[in-house]
Image: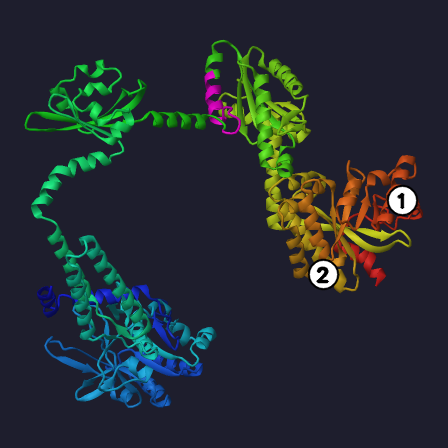
Amino acid sequence: MAVALAVVALGGLHNGLRYDLADFRFAGQTRDPSGDIVVIAIDAPSIDKVGVWPWPRALHAQLIRQLYKAGVQDIALDVDFSTPSDEASDREFAEALKTAGGSIVLPSFQQPRADRTHLQINRPLPQFADHSWPALVNVEIGKDGLVRRYPFGEKLAGTFLPSMAAVLAGQYVEHRDPFLIDYSIRAARIPKVSYADVLHGDEATLRKLNGKKVIVGATALELGDRFSVPNSEILPGPVLQAIAGESLLQSRTLRWTSGVVTAAGIAIIILVMLASWRLVSAGWRVATLLTMAISVEAGAFLLQAIFPLILDTALFHIGVVIYIAVIAVDEIVVRNILGRISESRFHRVAMTLSDGLICTDHLLRITVWNDGAAAIFGYSAQDMIGKHFEAIFADREKVAGLTISEAAALPVGNVTEFHGRRSNGDSFLMEVSYSGWQGTEGYHLCAVVRDISLRKQEAEKLRYLAEHDRLTGLANRYTLANWLAEMMIGVETKAEEVALIIVGLDGFQQINDTLGHSNGDLLLRSVAERLSMFAGPNAILARLSGDEFALAFSSFGASASVAEAEARLRGAFDEPVCAADRAYHVKLSIGAAVFPSDGRTPDELISNGHIALSYAKATNRGAYAAFEKGMRQTIEKRLTLESEIAQAAERGEFELFYQPQVHLSGHKLIGAEALIRWRHPVRGLVSPAEFMPVVNTSGHSQRIANWVLHTACRQARTWEQAGHPLRVGINLSPSQLHSGDLAEAVAATLAATGVTPSLIELEVTEDILIADERRVLDTFRHIQKLGVRLVFDDFGTGYASLSYLKKFPLDGLKIDRSFVGDLLTDADDAAIVSSTIGLSTQLGLSVIAEGIEDSATADLLARMGCQEGQGYFFGKPMPATDLSESWLRNAA
């Protein structure tokens, strides 16, 4: 041990390891720079902005002025000023140095002469040196090409010259040895700013430099001022100087510990091993050595992190390795190693295989039977050793004639499938891969056996899942298309037709939203069972998507058969469908297409069936439609309208009209309802009845609804600032409730426009309230806390309007025009309106009647107690400017 360590130490063989260990500790530590030293980088962006390097020294003069303007504490330029350049530029730079009072640090360095045998000293030109501080920028590059050590300074031509980092840190002492740079200070965290940003006086950049020490130097790759440092990093010269400066500022001038410490550690190892050599097992001794190595390295890590000391543990670890090697040689006899390897190599591999490994001798008698084979076949090695190889096969005739030459001729790695026989008599599919070798007695066969019965079952399961719907077990769209293709080929020779019926469940999304997807899934399974009973054995039934099913069959006169099937299909769902102790009255929309008249391919037939279903749903829920060519045009027209709506939103073609709302006593204007209009560039004003149904069911609904909300609030704010605080009613879209962020959107709009919340009145309809009562209730409460009013629009037209007055926090309601129009002539309408007004008064709700067309209706409503109204009698919807002109100007 002592001799080995002496050879290593005297030969310096451990130096590489000692540095590697120190570097490893640096990699595991992270120390933030103080931020007092900032690098002003001559980087690629600066070169792009300023021009090709080298730059005129007048630019450096301008930089110095900008730095003093920023209040920089110290300035060091890591740029060569040893040769003259443009005379005027040099003169301006010298003047800048003089103005700075000689406080600028300029670099000096040594470099080889042209003969490569002598060094020359490069100093700043005299006119620069007279007004600056000299500093050395040379660094020591180790034998491995890395910079680790940094000097406090060096004598050049008999004069001590401090290093640049030492000058910046104010710690230049002539008789101090170089220190090890602390590379746990991350180069990436050194503050850096671009030379061009400082030169151009960027205010944010200059603020960062106030009170800082700065090093100006090249960081651009093409300028070449780069050094390799530990942990595979390459740093620009000024960044290296900054890290050295940070090491000084943070008192991290690292030193190696004394050799006495290393010697003491090695002595401890020797003593421990001497004391335990024959008293404990080799395993315990190795564990002790490894524990000591880990503990010492952990201590070295902490020492290096806390104190500016690097513990030299290289010899210690080398000693540990030597002792482990000695223990190995002491414990293991070489001849036993060779014997054990030759004896156990094959069996070690064979017995650890999860697959079955079966080997034979030259007579095909089994000689090796591993645990994998025992698990597959159920026979132990004792049962099978010595038996013929054919014993593993269920059909022995396939291998009974296998000769040695045939076995030898089998390709190595050739894989074949056979049926094997387990010990319980079961047959199973196995995969066999053959190999072999030539022994002294002849050719030995070896087979790797794998039970693939489970894999085949999994493959069959995957095929089933690829062809069937997981939820219902019905065929999926892919399988339906394949079956349709086969049916189309079959009926072409019989002059038959193929009918495809696509069934959609009306209101299924509402079930999912209100009762949850698990209940929705149970309902879909029950519907699939009902459809399966209806379809019978001669039809194909598939599930296409969420709530859509398809039924296909072939017959003569399929068109008539489809109509009959549609009627019977509806009859099959007259009785409720039960799922999870619930009874559902399922309503169907049905579309149909027939081959060959409605489609020549499966995809075309399915597509046209979908078009028919969409047409049926658009016409009337629960309807039936057989495909016609005009349907596609109708759907395409809707798609075209959707596209035009999207373009209209982009081009700002939508605008808001405002219908006056007045106090019925005195006809004073109190508010206006905001109504969207589309001013088409070709068609002029488009009726809302034409485009709003499409908007409300398209992906643009929420965007347009939010635009309406923002525009109406902005207009209300305009009137308010003009001294006319009018209440503005805004119709809500269902999409705004479904998105879940309506309250946040209202709050943001109020903040953005500055309108008084009480001037905004949001109008809701029953189709909004019925969607998700709990979420709507929470949203309405948040909106009312903002101060915005909520009004029930079209009151009385729904089936559950009275229940909503109890459930939801509303501020008012609007009596629908259908009750107001015949108020003078229809006693029932008059009774309903009178009751609604009385009920609202008792509930503390405001009431506004819409659709007032004449003075008599307005007077009757006022006598009934209705205070507010709107309608053509007071004014049609009009642009905001017209409303201001006709109503507000006179009021002013």
SS type, badge 2 = loop
Q: CA distance from mark 1 to mark 2?
A: 33 Å
Earlier residue among tags 1 and 2: 2
**Nearest the eye: 643 or 804:** 804
Packing grade of label 2 (10 A; few <14, some 14-19, many >=20) is: many
Q: Which amino acid is tagged 1?
A: Asp
Q: Position of residue 523 (x, y in %)?
A: 60, 29
Q: Is residue 483 rendered magenta in the image? A: yes
Q: Position of residue 464 (x, y in %)?
A: 44, 25
Q: Is residue 607 rendered magenta in the image? A: no
Q: Is residue 229 visible?
A: no
SS type, badge 1 = loop
Q: Is residue 802 above or below residue 175?
A: above
Q: Position of residue 157 (x, y in %)?
A: 17, 87
Q: Is residue 787 above or below residue 100?
A: above
- Tell me the residue that label 2 is attached to: 755
Q: Is residue 39 above or below residue 358?
A: below
Packing grade of label 1 (10 A; few <14, some 14-19, many >=20) is: few
Q: Residue at x 63, y 51 (%)?
A: 741
For the N terminus, the quadrant is: bottom left
Residue furthest front as drawn: 279
Q: Is residue 611 above or below residue 795?
A: above
**Nearest the eye: 831 or 858:** 831
Residue span colored magenta: 470-486
- Tell me the residue that label 1 is attached to: 854
Q: Which amino acid is tagged 2?
A: Val
The image quarter containing residue 400 is top left
Q: Position of residue 35 (x, y in %)?
A: 39, 75
For the C terminus, the quadrant is: bottom right
